[in-house]
Amino acid sequence: MNQNEKLVQRIKKWQANPYFHPLTCGVDSMHEILEPVEKDGKVSLVCPTCGWVQSYMPAVFDLPEPP
């Protein structure tokens, strides 16, 4: 599994975890939660409701993954 695939899986786990606040749309936080999408070798977060794209990753995903 390459780094982008690992990042996508990590984001999906974050979004599904009831103990973490989900990553939400920058246009309207009431939209569906953001989904990780890999395009052109880069992972972005996309709002499935309106298509808004967040191209930067929150710093929490720069930390080592816990065992």
Image (cartoon, rainbow, N blue to C red):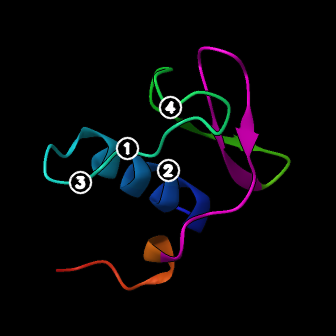
Q: Is residue 51 left or right of residue 64?
A: right
What is the distance, in whole Å, between disc 3 and disc 1 at their CAs?
12 Å
Asked if marks 1 and 2 touch (Cβ < 8 Å), the reply is yes
Q: Looking at the picture, does residue 48 appear above or below residue 24?
A: above
Mark sitting on residue 29: 4
Q: Residue at image x 23%, y 54%?
A: 20
Of pointers 4 and 3, the one earlier in the residue sequence: 3
What is the distance, in whole Å, between disc 1 and disc 4 at their CAs?
18 Å
What is the distance, in whole Å, between disc 4 and disc 3 at their CAs?
15 Å
Circle 4 or circle 2, nearest the eye: 4
What residue is pinned by disc 1?
12
Of pointers 1 and 4, the one earlier in the residue sequence: 1
Of pointers 3 and 2, the one earlier in the residue sequence: 2
What is the distance, in whole Å, between disc 1 and disc 2 at their CAs?
6 Å
Q: Looking at the picture, does residue 13 appear above or below residue 66?
A: above
What residue is pinned by disc 3?
20
Mark 1 residue type: Lys
Circle 4 or circle 3, nearest the eye: 4
Q: Position of residue 33 (x, y in %)?
A: 45, 30
Q: Residue at image x 14%, y 43%?
A: 18
Between 62 and 50, the one lying in front of the other is 50
